[in-house]
């Protein structure tokens, strides 16, 4: 029994202490709990700043639900996505002179769902530079700070009632689970169609690349990664679109320039038709009067006997 008790004591001494486990969970041995939470708060602030800036400056964002892709699968998906977008950029400049730059600025990144939800509420219901009291006459530089992490922004997202027709209320049901975001700095239907052909192809509308054209797309690792991605919607020019709306924008042939030309032609045709319709009655009346005048002139020249 004494030997058994001695073995138990030796095992207890060999086990790490509670303080040691706490230090391992917190971080490095030299980092205290206060320092850990300070670093965590700094990370949260940086994420919120990044997401609010992204939502304010990026006109096209697509949201995907992902099922924990591995690093190899993410690399394969990003490789094929970049290849497809670069193929569009190397062809004719269908969407303007800066379309070739989109491939280098495009990003597919994992986002923190909770932080993105907070950032969307801040962008939707808080305006930078607003004062807590709109009737305040305090000189510039002495008022209350109103940045994205200020108390004013916090009260705005807590006290504001969310309208049902707002962009946030439409995206809020989708902000569930792990999310990834595809970011494009410009609204380019051709580049969007190229990205959708890899991430969310639609047979007959936006088909996937063939094995001959893109053999890496049909690789097993890439297909496993794409099977774990699901397009749930997008935010384009501040408006919320579902999957069918995103596919409709990606299916615009010829890009925005062709769409603008079609719109101008439609408006010109409608205006010309309206002018013809409105002027037709006046012309008919004028012709009738001219005919009656000619008839009266003939009667004056040749009076009836």
Image (cartoon, rainbow, N blue to C red):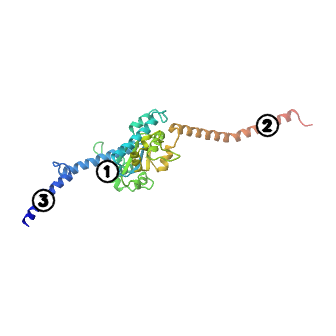
**Residue that mark 2 sits on:** 291
Residue that mark 1 sits on: 152
Q: Tell me residue 95's x, y (percent).
A: 48, 36
The single residue placed furthest to the bottom in the displayed view is 1
Q: Specify which label sits upstream in the sequence, 2 or 3.
A: 3
Q: Quadrant of the N terminus?
A: bottom left
Residue 136 coordinates in the image, percent (x, y)? 32, 48
Relative to 9, is 60 on the left or the right? right
| Residue occupied by mark 3 | 11
Q: Secondary structure at mark 3?
A: helix
Q: Which mark is residue 18?
A: none
- Residue 293, position as x, y percentages in the image: 79, 36
Nearest to the eye among marks 3 and 1: give it: 3
Q: Residue at x 41, y 56 (%)?
A: 173
- Which quadrant of the structure image shows residue 13? bottom left
Name the residue: 49% across, 43% down. 250
User: Which element type, helix, strand or loop, lies under badge 1?
Assistant: helix
Mark 2: give few (<14), some (14-19) or many (20+) Cα within 10 Å. Answer: few
Neighbourhood count class around disc 3 (C-alpha, 10 Å): few under 14, some 14–19, many 20 upward: few
Q: Earlier in the sequence, mark 3 or mark 1?
A: 3
């Amino acid at each position: 029994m004494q030997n058994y008790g001695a073995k138990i004591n030796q095992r207890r001494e060999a086990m790490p202490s509670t303080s040691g486990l706490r230090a391992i969970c917190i971080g490095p041995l030299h980092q205290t709990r206060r320092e850990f939470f300070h670093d965590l708060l700094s990370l949260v602030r940086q994420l919120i700043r990044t997401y609010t800036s992204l939502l304010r400056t990026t006109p096209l964002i697509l949201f995907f639900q992902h099922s924990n892709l591995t690093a190899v699968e993410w690399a394969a998906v990003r490789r094929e996505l970049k290849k497809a977008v670069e193929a569009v950029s190397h062809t004719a400049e269908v969407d303007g002179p800066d379309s070739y730059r989109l491939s280098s600025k495009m990003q597919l990144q994992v986002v923190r769902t909770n932080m993105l939800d907070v950032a969307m509420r801040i962008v939707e219901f808080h305006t930078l530079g607003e004062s807590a009291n709109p009737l305040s006459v305090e000189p510039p530089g002495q008022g209350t700070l109103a940045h994205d992490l200020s108390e004013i922004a916090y009260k705005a997202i807590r006290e504001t009632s969310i309208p049902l027709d707002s962009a946030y209320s439409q995206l809020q049901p989708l902000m569930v689970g792990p999310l990834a975001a595809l970011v494009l700095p410009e609204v380019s239907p051709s580049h969007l169609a190229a990205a959708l052909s890899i991430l969310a192809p639609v047979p007959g509308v936006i088909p996937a690349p063939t094995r001959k054209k893109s053999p890496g797309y049909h690789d097993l690792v890439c297909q496993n990664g794409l099977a774990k991605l699901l397009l749930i919607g997008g935010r384009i020019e501040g408006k919320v679109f579902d999957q069918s709306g995103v596919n409709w924008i990606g299916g615009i042939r010829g890009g925005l320039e062709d769409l603008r030309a079609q719109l101008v032609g439609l408006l010109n045709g409608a205006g010309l038709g309206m002018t013809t319709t409105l002027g037709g009655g006046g012309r008919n009346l004028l012709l009738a009067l001219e005919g009656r005048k000619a008839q009266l002139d003939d009667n004056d020249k040749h009076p009836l006997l």
